[in-house]
């Protein structure tokens, strides 16, 4: 039992990877997603994967699954009916939010519809002081009246969020139990049980979003689990989480909010592993799928974790891998508006009907149609030959764009329009890359682009040229990279506690800090113990949000959690001052620092994975293809990736093909297959400059 299966359900394709950790061999498969019933694509693709790998279910030791279903449910407002019970006077907590308008100068702007309508928010006379003391506890009559109002509101699940509840979680849980006893059959959840942190709006919003998708995800996970058992798998099922790790199925069922951004996070984890293996310490990940492109920055092999993410206009204060999304993917729809201006996305053709060239009824021009019109894709070998593309359909879809740009009767009107659309998409992506690097004070030419997703390898060179990046590292199986990230990710779960303590350089440890850290440590160890033998080794990480008194924003410092807490306060103080000095160029020597939040993460490391050495296979004859690059048609070499001898440079322009994707190597670039199996693309001018030095 050395085989692991990774599954990633995307909007356009569902990806599968089977990894043998003993040999490093990878078998991959892509299956068109089935939006009406996502489990159907999982069931179909799983059978195809097992057949291709030639193994039995008993050979599999672990299955890891990631999906965007919960995220899409939130974005499309398709969740269940949620009720909210909160402290008297806080009825508008979700509608007021942070009292900020997304479009300050738009007189006609309307706020997003809240996840809980105002008539389903019920007030209760329960309140906690800022120090955790109980100001007012509802009596039996008050609880009965609130329960009756909840029953009349016809909700599917109830969230209880009390003002300052994070300072006394036991009190909030007591109120939730009192209501649950009077509402048999209705799930009642205390907000602090989902995420115990200060900021009433954010904490309440996390609990509401979790409740909004929990019944849907519970049913989906139950369906997936049934499918696996019907196949005969006995391996445990894990779910990828937003923090770049994985959690067990029971945790995912109870806390689907932890998996909300799991797909993009898994890809970043795989990219980090790939970069370390190739000896590259600074990368920009570029995940281009069917509906969007996700970009992240990694330095020293560690993904950046943030608590300042958002879903639309809703803040997500959970620790998640820091990924920025752009509405430009392979299925993004192209429009030519008045004046010959091109727009790409954010609308997408999705999996059904898909791009026009799929021949499934879609007529809108997309980025994939542009790839085909420019000759980058082989219409007969797309998706391993399982889906034949229609060049005529792509041309028909892009013809309107060419006319809108005023190309008239030009014989190359359609490929010119396609190339223009690709440049617009590249510009959108490059702008986001430059913004992310600028925030870190980093230069683009010090980073390497790592593309993955179905369209990432095809588009990456155009993005690199636009963003000023000179090196590209294409993984062996980029089109199913997020599924691969799922099977190499460690187990991980975060446990949070808000606190209000002050630490100084003197090393005096606040008793509350010691107590909070000890309680979080016990929670983390209990979860690790419940995971049994899934991980070989465990470590505990401590993250603390800190600031000088009066500052509006926090800095997060991290360290391994030790058994001895004697010098913890002083150690965190030193880490804060070091980071403040690096970022802002100064510290306030000798001044105490406020510690406002603690997060203890339990990380379980999986068994190591062997590396498979690539072998070059003989190429049958010289193959050529006409591609449209730089405004003209070019006859270029067409090479299968497995035919490239490791270490031998391949000059562009050329096309590198493999079963799951196509890599475009423009002129002034060269490709080298590394001993790791990855493909390194470098600008020729950069190579020559390095040789001269």
Image (cartoon, rainbow, N blue to C red):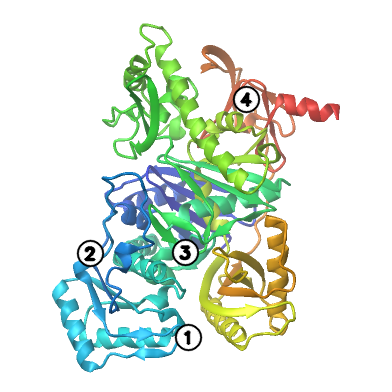
Q: What residue occupies the far left of the structure in this picture?
A: 152
Of callouts 4 and 3, which one flags the residue occurring earlier in the amino acid sequence? Answer: 3
Q: CA distance from mark 1 to mark 4?
A: 72 Å
Circle 4 — which element? loop
Q: CA distance from mark 2 to mark 4?
A: 63 Å
Q: What residue occupies the far bottom of the structure in this picture?
A: 140
Determine which residue is flagged by label 1. 131
Residue at x 28%, y 27% (from the top left corner): 363
**Neighbours of disc 4 within 10 Å: few (<14), some (14-19), many (20+):** few
Badge nearest the viewer, 2 or 1: 1
Of callouts 1 and 4, which one flags the residue occurring earlier in the amino acid sequence? Answer: 1
Of callouts 1 and 3, which one flags the residue occurring earlier in the amino acid sequence? Answer: 1
Q: Position of residue 165 (x, y in %)?
A: 40, 80
**Neighbours of disc 2 within 10 Å: few (<14), some (14-19), many (20+):** some
Circle 3 — which element? loop
Determine which of the numbered discs, if any, sits on residue 117 in the image: 2
**Neighbours of disc 3 within 10 Å: few (<14), some (14-19), many (20+):** some
Circle 2 — which element? loop
Determine which of the numbered discs, if any, sits on residue 317 in the image: 3
Determine which residue is flagged by label 4. 619
Quadrant of res 390:
top left
Badge nearest the viewer, 1 or 3: 1
């Amino acid at each position: 039992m050395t085989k692991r299966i990774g599954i990633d359900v995307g909007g356009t394709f569902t990806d599968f990877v089977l990894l043998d950790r003993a040999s490093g061999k990878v078998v991959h498969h892509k299956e068109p997603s089935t939006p009406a019933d996502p489990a159907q694509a999982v069931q179909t693709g799983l059978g195809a994967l097992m057949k291709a790998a030639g193994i039995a279910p008993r050979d599999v030791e672990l299955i890891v699954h990631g999906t965007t279903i919960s995220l899409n449910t939130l974005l499309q407002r398709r969740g269940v009916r949620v009720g909210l019970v909160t402290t008297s006077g806080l009825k508008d907590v979700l509608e007021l939010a942070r009292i900020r308008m997304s479009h300050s100068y738009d007189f006609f702007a309307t706020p997003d519809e809240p996840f809980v309508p105002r008539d389903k928010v019920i007030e209760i006379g329960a309140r906690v002081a800022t120090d955790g003391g109980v100001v007012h506890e509802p009596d039996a009559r008050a609880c009965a009246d609130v329960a009756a109002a909840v029953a009349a509101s016809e909700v599917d699940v109830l969230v209880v969020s009390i003002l300052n509840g994070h300072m006394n979680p036991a009190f909030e849980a007591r109120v939730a139990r009192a209501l649950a006893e009077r509402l048999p059959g209705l799930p009642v959840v205390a907000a602090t049980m989902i995420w115990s942190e200060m900021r009433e709006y954010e904490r309440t919003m996390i609990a509401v979003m979790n409740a909004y998708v929990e019944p849907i995800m519970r049913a989906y996970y139950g369906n997936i689990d049934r499918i696996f058992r019907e196949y005969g798998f006995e391996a445990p099922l894990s779910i990828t989480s937003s923090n770049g790790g994985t959690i067990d199925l029971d945790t995912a069922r109870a806390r689907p909010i932890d998996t909300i951004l799991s797909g993009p996070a898994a890809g970043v984890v795989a990219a980090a592993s790939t970069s370390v293996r190739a000896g590259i310490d600074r990368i920009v990940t570029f995940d281009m799928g069917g509906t969007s492109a996700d970009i992240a920055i990694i330095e020293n092999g560690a993904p950046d974790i943030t608590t300042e993410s958002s879903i639309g206009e809703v803040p997500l204060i959970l620790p998640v891998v820091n990924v920025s999304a752009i509405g430009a993917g392979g299925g993004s729809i192209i429009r030519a508006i008045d004046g010959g201006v091109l727009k790409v996305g954010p609308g997408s053709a999705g999996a059904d009907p898909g791009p026009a060239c799929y021949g499934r009824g879609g007529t809108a021009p997309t980025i994939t149609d542009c790839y085909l019109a420019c000759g980058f894709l082989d219409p007969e070998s797309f998706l391993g030959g399982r889906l034949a593309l229609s060049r005529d359909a792509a041309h028909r879809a892009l013809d309107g764009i060419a006319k809108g740009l005023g190309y008239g009767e030009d014989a190359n009107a359609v490929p010119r329009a396609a190339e223009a659309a690709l440049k617009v998409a590249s510009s959108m992506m490059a702008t986001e890359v430059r913004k992310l690097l600028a925030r870190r004070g980093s230069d683009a030419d010090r980073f390497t682009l790592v593309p993955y997703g179905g369209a990432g390898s095809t588009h990456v060179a155009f993005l690199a040229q636009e963003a000023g990046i000179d090196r590209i590292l294409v993984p062996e199986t980029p089109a199913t990279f997020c599924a691969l990230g799922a099977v190499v990710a460690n187990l991980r779960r975060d446990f949070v506690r808000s606190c209000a303590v002050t630490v100084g350089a003197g090393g005096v440890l606040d008793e509350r800090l010691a107590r909070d850290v000890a309680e979080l440590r016990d929670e983390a160890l209990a979860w690790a113990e419940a995971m049994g033998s899934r991980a070989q080794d465990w470590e505990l990480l401590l993250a603390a949000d800190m600031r000088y008194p009066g500052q509006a924003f926090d800095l997060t410092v991290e360290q391994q959690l030790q058994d001895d807490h004697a010098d913890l306060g002083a150690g965190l103080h030193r880490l804060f001052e070091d980071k403040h000095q690096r970022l802002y160029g100064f510290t306030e020597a000798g001044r105490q620092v406020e510690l406002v939040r603690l997060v203890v993460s339990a990380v379980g490391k999986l068994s190591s994975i062997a590396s498979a050495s690539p072998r070059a296979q003989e190429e049958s004859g010289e193959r050529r293809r006409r591609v449209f690059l730089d405004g003209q048609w070019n006859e270029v070499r067409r090479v299968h990736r497995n035919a490239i001898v490791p270490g031998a440079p391949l000059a562009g322009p050329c096309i590198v093909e493999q079963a799951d994707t196509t890599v475009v190597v423009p002129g002034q670039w060269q490709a080298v297959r590394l001993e790791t199996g990855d493909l390194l693309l470098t600008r020729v001018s950069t190579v020559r400059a390095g040789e001269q030095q």
